[in-house]
Amino acid sequence: MPAKTEKQLTRKKNPKFSSMALISSLPQFPDTRISLRLFHNVSNASEIRSKVAQLPYAIIDARSICSLEQVYSAIYRALVESKYGKLKTKSLHSECLYSLSATSNIGEAYKNFGIKDDSQMLLVIQIVDKDQQDLQLQGDEVPLNDENLSQNCDMTFIRKIYKLNEFHSTSTIEISRAVVNCIQLRGL
Amino acid sequence: MSEEIVSRVSNYLTPQVPFKAIAQGAEAVVFTTNVHPYLPAKDSNNKTYVIKYRPPKRYRHPSIDRSLTKHRTLSESRLLAKLFLIPGLKVPQLIACDAYNGYIWIEFLGEDLPNDAGFSNLKNFLWMFAPSDPYDPIVKETLIKVGEQIGLLHWNDYCHGDLTSSNIVLVREGPESWQPYLIDFGLGSTSNMVEDKGVDLYVLERAIVSTHSLFADTYKEWLMHGFCQVYKNNGAEGEKKLKEVLNRFQEVRMRGRKRSMIG
């Protein structure tokens, strides 16, 4: 199919539309574009961490993410809170990070989900309607999907931060569902 | 249902989320939709989702109304989240909760029964078997499972509050096998009081007796078999607690649901 090849080519030329990114919008927020990208083997995490406050992204350590459901659930919550004036942090991006957390402590949310100096896998969330600033991230972009997330996440850590140590199931789907419950109900 | 509620909901959900009203209670309206609030469409495979909305009541002071709506929406969601963690207990999955506006998104369970027998809740299921074989082995197996679900709920010190045969939904697991799920925890609570558990059992008994009176004795026996089994699996402590619950159940049956006769 020639049409497809052409599309792929233009995508390659334009780094802003990498084919591995997941770009979507949520049904209740059609005007908000959400772009999600996953990077492995990131080598300059500490450099990015030092200027993370200026970057228009939510940068998340992918070790604490086990499914797309988990990420989208937090983004949904952040968008709802923003629409009804309930934001607890300064921006929508930081609210995404905060929404992922199971506790109402913003500092702890950053510690658990934010980029760390030794982070090698990063999930980059961008919620925009305007053009973006380039992300100077050294690493390999990989397709963002449930397999890539669940195979590389740190289940022990996830169980710890969401207080699911007692949870009987070992299936990622079930754990992800329990995590979604925590995200939706945090601090209310 | 009032135009006002529909327009409020469609305003909140935006035109991207089509919805259909399926039930209305005193406190909430229940809608279905086939749009997932946040998962991309390809992952959700045309599934159905339930939206439970508690509209504001105009006879209440706005600030009291807001806090009541938030409180009730949250307590139902919290209960669903806690029950989800109990091994063996089957409840619908919570998808999203917007307590400020009174919306809960839940997974839709059940299906339409064959031969126009209606939606697959326990009531319609029992009615479907009544003309042919009310004591079919599938009925027995299903009712025992229902009993087990209630037993698990009570053993873990939770109460449903409105346990009727339409609040028990059957999900098909095979051609001849159904798994009961408890739904609608709007009146649910955590409670270690035998009274609440006795009342739960009494309410269900009344529901069964009044809709399937001819077969109610056998149905009750199967339900209680499943219920007791859960307690008996927990050794001496289980036996002791089971005795307390059953004694109280007897007591409630003699006097009715309301102990205090106030309200």
Image (cartoon, grey):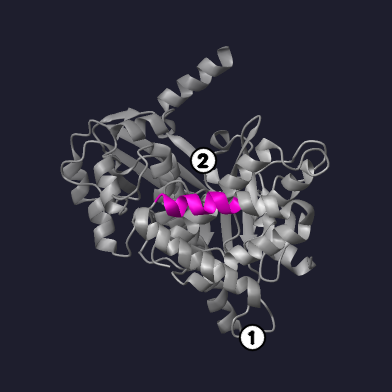
Q: Residues within 10 Å of mark 1 (few under 14, many from 20)?
A: few
Under tag 1, what secondary structure? loop
Relative placement, left or right, of A164 versus B75 is left
Residue B67 tag number? none
What percent of the width, then of the height, locates residue B216?
A: 72, 54
Labels 2 & 1 near each other (Cβ < 8 A): no
Q: Amino acid at mark 1?
A: Met
Residue at x 69% of width, y 81% of height: B58
Residue B261 tag number? 1
Q: Amino acid at mark 2?
A: Ser
Image mark 1: chain: B
B239 versus A169 height, above or below: below
Q: Main secondary structure of the magenta part?
A: helix
* Residue B261 lies in the magenta-colored region: no
* Residue B231 lies in the magenta-colored region: yes
What percent of the width, then of the height, locates residue B2?
A: 79, 68
Relative placement, left or right, of B152 versus A163 is right
Image mark 2: chain: A
* Stretch in magenta: B223-233
What percent of the width, then of the height, locates residue B156?
A: 42, 59
Measured in 3D between alpha carbons, the distance from the residue under mark 2 to the one under mark 1, in whole angstroms, is 56 Å
Q: Which residue is mark 2?
A: A24
Q: Quadrant of residue A66?
A: top left
B33 versus B203 height, above or below: above
**Between B48 and B251, which is closer to the camera in this rendering?**
B251
